[in-house]
Amino acid sequence: MKSRTFLYVSLGVDIIIAASKFIAAMITGSSSMISEGIHSVIDAFSQLMLIWGVRSSRKSPDDERPFGYGRELYFWSFMVSLVIFILGGCISFYQGVLRLRRPEISGSPTLTYIILGIAFLFTCVSLYTALKEFNKQRGHTSFFKAVTESKDPPTFIVLLGDVGDLFGLVIAFGGVYLGRLFHSPYCDGGASMLIGIIMIVISLLLVRESKSLLMGEPTSKKNMRTIVALTEADEAVIKVKKHFSTYMGPEEVLMQLNTIFKPDLNTGQITDAIERISKNIQSQFPRIKQIFIEPVR
Protein backbone atom coordinates (compact mmCIF):
# COMPACT_ATOMS: atom_id res chain seq x y z
CA MET A 1 0.00 0.00 0.00
CA LYS A 2 1.33 3.40 -1.00
CA SER A 3 2.37 5.92 1.64
CA ARG A 4 0.05 8.92 1.92
CA THR A 5 2.33 10.94 4.19
CA PHE A 6 2.72 13.59 1.48
CA LEU A 7 -1.03 14.35 1.69
CA TYR A 8 -0.82 15.24 5.38
CA VAL A 9 2.39 17.21 4.88
CA SER A 10 0.75 19.18 2.07
CA LEU A 11 -2.39 19.79 4.17
CA GLY A 12 -0.40 21.18 7.09
CA VAL A 13 1.71 23.36 4.81
CA ASP A 14 -1.35 24.76 3.02
CA ILE A 15 -3.12 25.69 6.27
CA ILE A 16 -0.07 27.52 7.62
CA ILE A 17 0.58 29.31 4.33
CA ALA A 18 -3.07 30.30 3.81
CA ALA A 19 -3.25 31.92 7.25
CA SER A 20 -0.02 33.86 6.72
CA LYS A 21 -1.04 35.04 3.24
CA PHE A 22 -4.40 36.37 4.41
CA ILE A 23 -2.74 38.20 7.31
CA ALA A 24 -0.35 39.84 4.86
CA ALA A 25 -3.24 40.66 2.49
CA MET A 26 -5.23 42.31 5.30
CA ILE A 27 -2.26 44.47 6.29
CA THR A 28 -1.03 45.42 2.81
CA GLY A 29 -4.23 45.21 0.77
CA SER A 30 -2.42 43.26 -1.95
CA SER A 31 -4.76 41.68 -4.50
CA SER A 32 -2.23 39.04 -5.53
CA MET A 33 -1.78 38.04 -1.87
CA ILE A 34 -5.55 37.57 -1.57
CA SER A 35 -5.43 35.35 -4.67
CA GLU A 36 -2.53 33.39 -3.20
CA GLY A 37 -4.45 33.01 0.06
CA ILE A 38 -7.46 31.68 -1.86
CA HIS A 39 -5.09 29.36 -3.73
CA SER A 40 -3.78 27.89 -0.46
CA VAL A 41 -7.27 27.53 1.07
CA ILE A 42 -8.45 25.64 -2.01
CA ASP A 43 -5.32 23.47 -1.86
CA ALA A 44 -5.99 22.63 1.80
CA PHE A 45 -9.63 21.82 1.04
CA SER A 46 -8.45 19.64 -1.84
CA GLN A 47 -6.11 17.67 0.44
CA LEU A 48 -9.02 16.99 2.81
CA MET A 49 -11.12 15.69 -0.07
CA LEU A 50 -8.27 13.46 -1.26
CA ILE A 51 -7.68 12.11 2.25
CA TRP A 52 -11.40 11.31 2.48
CA GLY A 53 -11.24 9.63 -0.92
CA VAL A 54 -8.25 7.50 0.10
CA ARG A 55 -9.99 6.35 3.28
CA SER A 56 -13.28 5.63 1.52
CA SER A 57 -11.56 3.65 -1.23
CA ARG A 58 -10.01 1.28 1.32
CA LYS A 59 -13.36 -0.11 2.48
CA SER A 60 -13.78 -3.82 1.86
CA PRO A 61 -16.22 -5.06 -0.81
CA ASP A 62 -19.76 -5.74 0.39
CA ASP A 63 -23.15 -6.70 -1.06
CA GLU A 64 -23.76 -3.17 -2.36
CA ARG A 65 -20.29 -2.83 -3.89
CA PRO A 66 -19.05 -6.35 -4.74
CA PHE A 67 -16.11 -4.92 -6.70
CA GLY A 68 -15.04 -2.71 -3.80
CA TYR A 69 -14.86 1.04 -3.26
CA GLY A 70 -11.62 1.76 -5.12
CA ARG A 71 -13.23 4.23 -7.51
CA GLU A 72 -14.24 6.46 -4.60
CA LEU A 73 -10.71 7.83 -4.87
CA TYR A 74 -11.19 8.60 -8.56
CA PHE A 75 -14.50 10.35 -7.87
CA TRP A 76 -13.03 12.61 -5.18
CA SER A 77 -10.00 13.30 -7.35
CA PHE A 78 -12.34 14.48 -10.10
CA MET A 79 -14.19 16.68 -7.61
CA VAL A 80 -10.89 18.20 -6.45
CA SER A 81 -10.05 19.09 -10.05
CA LEU A 82 -13.38 20.90 -10.44
CA VAL A 83 -12.97 22.69 -7.10
CA ILE A 84 -9.54 23.99 -8.09
CA PHE A 85 -11.04 25.33 -11.32
CA ILE A 86 -14.30 26.83 -10.01
CA LEU A 87 -13.31 28.07 -6.58
CA GLY A 88 -9.64 28.67 -7.17
CA GLY A 89 -8.90 29.82 -10.68
CA CYS A 90 -12.09 31.76 -11.35
CA ILE A 91 -12.16 33.55 -7.98
CA SER A 92 -8.49 34.52 -8.27
CA PHE A 93 -9.04 35.81 -11.80
CA TYR A 94 -12.10 37.79 -10.70
CA GLN A 95 -10.16 39.25 -7.78
CA GLY A 96 -7.63 40.57 -10.27
CA VAL A 97 -10.39 42.06 -12.43
CA LEU A 98 -11.81 43.89 -9.39
CA ARG A 99 -8.38 45.32 -8.61
CA LEU A 100 -7.99 46.57 -12.18
CA ARG A 101 -11.40 48.23 -12.01
CA ARG A 102 -10.63 49.83 -8.64
CA PRO A 103 -6.88 50.31 -8.59
CA GLU A 104 -5.17 50.90 -5.26
CA ILE A 105 -1.52 51.08 -4.31
CA SER A 106 -0.76 48.35 -1.76
CA GLY A 107 0.79 49.17 1.59
CA SER A 108 4.37 48.40 2.64
CA PRO A 109 5.58 45.34 0.72
CA THR A 110 8.09 44.20 3.37
CA LEU A 111 5.65 41.89 5.15
CA THR A 112 4.44 40.55 1.81
CA TYR A 113 8.00 39.67 0.77
CA ILE A 114 8.61 37.90 4.09
CA ILE A 115 5.37 35.89 3.85
CA LEU A 116 6.05 34.96 0.24
CA GLY A 117 9.56 33.81 1.14
CA ILE A 118 8.29 31.65 4.00
CA ALA A 119 5.50 30.26 1.80
CA PHE A 120 8.04 29.43 -0.90
CA LEU A 121 10.15 27.41 1.55
CA PHE A 122 7.14 25.52 2.97
CA THR A 123 5.84 24.79 -0.53
CA CYS A 124 9.25 23.38 -1.49
CA VAL A 125 8.97 20.97 1.47
CA SER A 126 5.52 19.85 0.31
CA LEU A 127 6.73 19.53 -3.28
CA TYR A 128 9.73 17.46 -2.18
CA THR A 129 7.55 14.90 -0.36
CA ALA A 130 5.12 14.64 -3.29
CA LEU A 131 7.93 14.42 -5.85
CA LYS A 132 9.68 11.71 -3.82
CA GLU A 133 6.53 9.55 -3.87
CA PHE A 134 5.89 10.31 -7.54
CA ASN A 135 9.44 9.35 -8.55
CA LYS A 136 9.06 6.04 -6.71
CA GLN A 137 6.01 5.27 -8.82
CA ARG A 138 7.26 6.49 -12.20
CA GLY A 139 10.69 4.81 -12.16
CA HIS A 140 12.47 5.70 -15.41
CA THR A 141 9.35 6.97 -17.20
CA SER A 142 9.43 10.61 -18.31
CA PHE A 143 7.64 13.12 -16.08
CA PHE A 144 4.72 14.04 -18.37
CA LYS A 145 4.21 10.48 -19.58
CA ALA A 146 4.11 9.32 -15.94
CA VAL A 147 1.42 11.92 -15.15
CA THR A 148 -0.79 10.83 -18.05
CA GLU A 149 -0.26 7.12 -17.33
CA SER A 150 -0.51 7.30 -13.54
CA LYS A 151 -3.40 5.46 -11.90
CA ASP A 152 -2.83 7.19 -8.55
CA PRO A 153 -4.39 10.70 -8.79
CA PRO A 154 -3.54 12.03 -5.28
CA THR A 155 0.16 11.91 -6.12
CA PHE A 156 0.02 13.90 -9.35
CA ILE A 157 -2.72 16.25 -8.06
CA VAL A 158 -0.59 17.31 -5.08
CA LEU A 159 2.53 17.45 -7.23
CA LEU A 160 1.01 19.67 -9.92
CA GLY A 161 -0.74 21.74 -7.26
CA ASP A 162 2.60 22.45 -5.58
CA VAL A 163 4.20 23.33 -8.90
CA GLY A 164 1.34 25.76 -9.50
CA ASP A 165 1.84 27.18 -6.01
CA LEU A 166 5.50 27.92 -6.70
CA PHE A 167 4.67 29.68 -9.96
CA GLY A 168 1.92 31.61 -8.18
CA LEU A 169 4.30 32.76 -5.45
CA VAL A 170 6.84 33.99 -7.99
CA ILE A 171 4.10 35.85 -9.89
CA ALA A 172 2.71 37.38 -6.68
CA PHE A 173 6.20 38.57 -5.77
CA GLY A 174 6.63 40.04 -9.24
CA GLY A 175 3.26 41.78 -9.09
CA VAL A 176 4.00 43.42 -5.75
CA TYR A 177 7.57 44.34 -6.69
CA LEU A 178 6.69 45.83 -10.08
CA GLY A 179 3.73 47.65 -8.58
CA ARG A 180 6.02 49.39 -6.10
CA LEU A 181 8.73 49.97 -8.68
CA PHE A 182 6.43 51.68 -11.19
CA HIS A 183 3.91 52.99 -8.63
CA SER A 184 1.20 51.16 -10.56
CA PRO A 185 -1.71 49.26 -8.94
CA TYR A 186 -2.32 47.39 -12.19
CA CYS A 187 0.68 45.09 -11.74
CA ASP A 188 -0.87 43.59 -8.61
CA GLY A 189 -4.23 43.02 -10.32
CA GLY A 190 -2.55 41.55 -13.38
CA ALA A 191 -0.56 39.16 -11.17
CA SER A 192 -3.80 38.02 -9.51
CA MET A 193 -5.37 37.31 -12.90
CA LEU A 194 -2.27 35.40 -14.04
CA ILE A 195 -2.37 33.26 -10.88
CA GLY A 196 -6.00 32.45 -11.68
CA ILE A 197 -5.11 31.45 -15.24
CA ILE A 198 -2.35 29.12 -13.99
CA MET A 199 -4.81 27.44 -11.61
CA ILE A 200 -7.34 27.01 -14.42
CA VAL A 201 -4.76 25.47 -16.78
CA ILE A 202 -3.60 23.00 -14.10
CA SER A 203 -7.20 22.21 -13.26
CA LEU A 204 -8.09 21.42 -16.88
CA LEU A 205 -5.20 18.94 -17.03
CA LEU A 206 -6.31 17.34 -13.75
CA VAL A 207 -9.96 17.18 -14.88
CA ARG A 208 -8.91 15.35 -18.05
CA GLU A 209 -6.78 12.79 -16.21
CA SER A 210 -9.27 12.26 -13.35
CA LYS A 211 -12.19 11.87 -15.76
CA SER A 212 -10.29 9.23 -17.71
CA LEU A 213 -9.60 7.24 -14.53
CA LEU A 214 -13.20 7.59 -13.35
CA MET A 215 -14.51 6.25 -16.66
CA GLY A 216 -12.07 3.33 -16.49
CA GLU A 217 -8.57 2.83 -17.87
CA PRO A 218 -7.15 -0.56 -18.89
CA THR A 219 -3.88 -2.07 -17.78
CA SER A 220 -0.90 -1.30 -20.00
CA LYS A 221 -0.51 -3.01 -23.38
CA LYS A 222 2.83 -4.43 -22.27
CA ASN A 223 1.28 -6.07 -19.20
CA MET A 224 -1.67 -7.31 -21.25
CA ARG A 225 0.64 -9.00 -23.77
CA THR A 226 2.45 -10.75 -20.92
CA ILE A 227 -0.85 -11.89 -19.37
CA VAL A 228 -2.12 -13.24 -22.68
CA ALA A 229 1.19 -15.09 -23.17
CA LEU A 230 0.96 -16.59 -19.68
CA THR A 231 -2.58 -17.76 -20.35
CA GLU A 232 -1.84 -19.23 -23.75
CA ALA A 233 1.22 -21.01 -22.34
CA ASP A 234 -1.07 -23.20 -20.23
CA GLU A 235 -1.47 -26.70 -21.63
CA ALA A 236 -5.26 -26.47 -21.55
CA VAL A 237 -5.54 -23.29 -23.62
CA ILE A 238 -5.66 -22.83 -27.38
CA LYS A 239 -5.80 -19.02 -27.38
CA VAL A 240 -7.20 -15.92 -25.68
CA LYS A 241 -9.92 -14.61 -27.97
CA LYS A 242 -10.67 -11.31 -26.22
CA HIS A 243 -9.54 -9.54 -23.08
CA PHE A 244 -10.91 -6.69 -20.98
CA SER A 245 -9.39 -4.89 -18.01
CA THR A 246 -10.06 -1.77 -15.97
CA TYR A 247 -8.52 -0.09 -12.95
CA MET A 248 -10.92 -0.02 -9.99
CA GLY A 249 -8.33 1.88 -7.92
CA PRO A 250 -4.58 2.59 -7.93
CA GLU A 251 -3.82 -0.95 -6.75
CA GLU A 252 -6.88 -2.80 -8.08
CA VAL A 253 -7.42 -4.20 -11.56
CA LEU A 254 -10.44 -6.18 -12.71
CA MET A 255 -9.87 -8.43 -15.72
CA GLN A 256 -11.80 -10.74 -18.00
CA LEU A 257 -10.24 -13.20 -20.43
CA ASN A 258 -12.43 -14.86 -23.04
CA THR A 259 -10.44 -18.03 -23.58
CA ILE A 260 -10.69 -20.92 -26.03
CA PHE A 261 -9.86 -24.19 -24.27
CA LYS A 262 -9.00 -27.50 -25.92
CA PRO A 263 -12.22 -29.25 -26.99
CA ASP A 264 -11.41 -32.60 -25.37
CA LEU A 265 -11.40 -31.16 -21.80
CA ASN A 266 -14.25 -31.84 -19.41
CA THR A 267 -15.77 -29.29 -17.01
CA GLY A 268 -13.53 -30.30 -14.11
CA GLN A 269 -10.36 -29.97 -16.17
CA ILE A 270 -11.40 -26.53 -17.43
CA THR A 271 -12.15 -25.42 -13.86
CA ASP A 272 -8.72 -26.61 -12.72
CA ALA A 273 -7.09 -24.78 -15.63
CA ILE A 274 -8.93 -21.54 -14.78
CA GLU A 275 -7.75 -21.71 -11.16
CA ARG A 276 -4.20 -22.51 -12.25
CA ILE A 277 -4.07 -19.65 -14.76
CA SER A 278 -5.58 -17.17 -12.29
CA LYS A 279 -3.01 -18.00 -9.61
CA ASN A 280 -0.18 -17.75 -12.11
CA ILE A 281 -1.30 -14.31 -13.33
CA GLN A 282 -1.91 -12.94 -9.83
CA SER A 283 1.48 -14.15 -8.62
CA GLN A 284 3.15 -11.96 -11.26
CA PHE A 285 0.60 -9.13 -11.25
CA PRO A 286 -0.67 -8.68 -7.68
CA ARG A 287 -2.69 -5.60 -8.69
CA ILE A 288 -5.10 -7.86 -10.56
CA LYS A 289 -7.44 -8.62 -7.69
CA GLN A 290 -10.26 -10.23 -9.68
CA ILE A 291 -9.92 -12.34 -12.83
CA PHE A 292 -12.83 -13.77 -14.78
CA ILE A 293 -11.75 -16.41 -17.27
CA GLU A 294 -14.68 -17.30 -19.50
CA PRO A 295 -14.50 -20.36 -21.76
CA VAL A 296 -15.64 -19.49 -25.30
CA ARG A 297 -15.64 -21.13 -28.71
Image: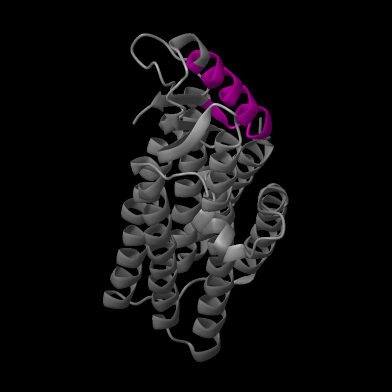
Residue 243 quadrant: top left
In the rendering, at what x and y percent does residue 108 appear?
A: 57, 71
Residue 81 horizontal side relative to residue 290, left or right? left
Residue 137 horizontal side relative to residue 151, left or right? right
Q: Is residue 171 above or below residue 222?
A: below
Q: Main secondary structure of the magenta part?
A: helix
Write the residue at 39% across / 25% down: 295
Q: Is residue 239 above or below residue 165?
A: above
In the rendering, at what x and y percent does residue 281 appear?
A: 61, 31
- Say which quadrant the C terminus sits in: top left
* Residue 192 shown in magenta: no
- Say which quadrant the N terminus sits in: top right
Q: Is residue 130 visible?
A: yes
Residue 227 quadrant: top right
Residue, far bottom: 182
Residue, far left: 101
Write the residue at 49% across / 14% down: 271
The magenta stretch spans which residues? 270-289
Q: Is residue 88 visible?
A: no
Write the residue at 43% across / 62% down: 199
